[in-house]
Amino acid sequence: MSTQNISNSIPLSHAPDGTGYKLMELPPELLELLESQDPPTLTLHPSPTAALLKTPSATYSLRQKNTSNALILLTPTASPASGRADEGPPAARLSTIATVHETIEIVPEDGAAAAPAPKARGKWHEKFGRGR
């Protein structure tokens, strides 16, 4: 059995900030366009199958991807000072502000209309979870 030295650990607390977070992975060409000297205005448009993100030169479809592996967003915080001068500076802490279970996938579109999302084959929830 191993022992752990917890005196060097950073305390973790749960402090949700009430903001809903969605993470998006940008394709390299879209990231380059947004980081340029003169970034264009992006617009969102609805379609029957997916939201469309339009730039002056390209159209992308946005699709939600769910994952069983949650991503936890953390922020550094300091423990409250007790007011005593001999205790030194406040201790470092981490607070979880959100847990993200979905990401937004951005896919370049070939045509004017969004193509339907590819269907997963052979997954349990596709076979048995329809009636849930």
Image: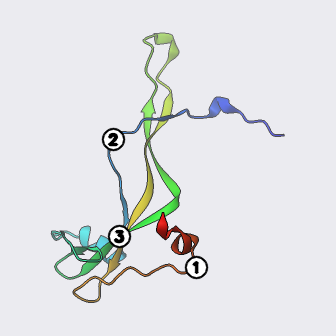
Q: Nearer the viewer, residue 105 or 81?
A: 105
Which marked residue is nearer to the observer: mark 3 or mark 1?
A: 1
Q: Nearer the viewer, residue 8 or 85?
A: 8
- Name the amino acid type tagged 2: Gly
Q: Earlier in the sequence, mark 3 or mark 1?
A: 3
Label for residue 18?
A: 2
Residue identifier under label 1: 122
In the picture, measured across the screen, residue 116 lies left or right of residue 84, that is left
Callout 1 secondary element = loop
Residue identifier under label 3: 26
Residue 23 placement (x, y as % from top left)? 38, 60
In the picture, measured across the screen, residue 118 lies left or right of residue 12, that is left
Q: Earlier in the sequence, mark 3 or mark 2?
A: 2
Callout 3 secondary element = loop
In the picture, measured across the screen, residue 22 lies left or right of residue 76, that is left
Callout 2 secondary element = loop
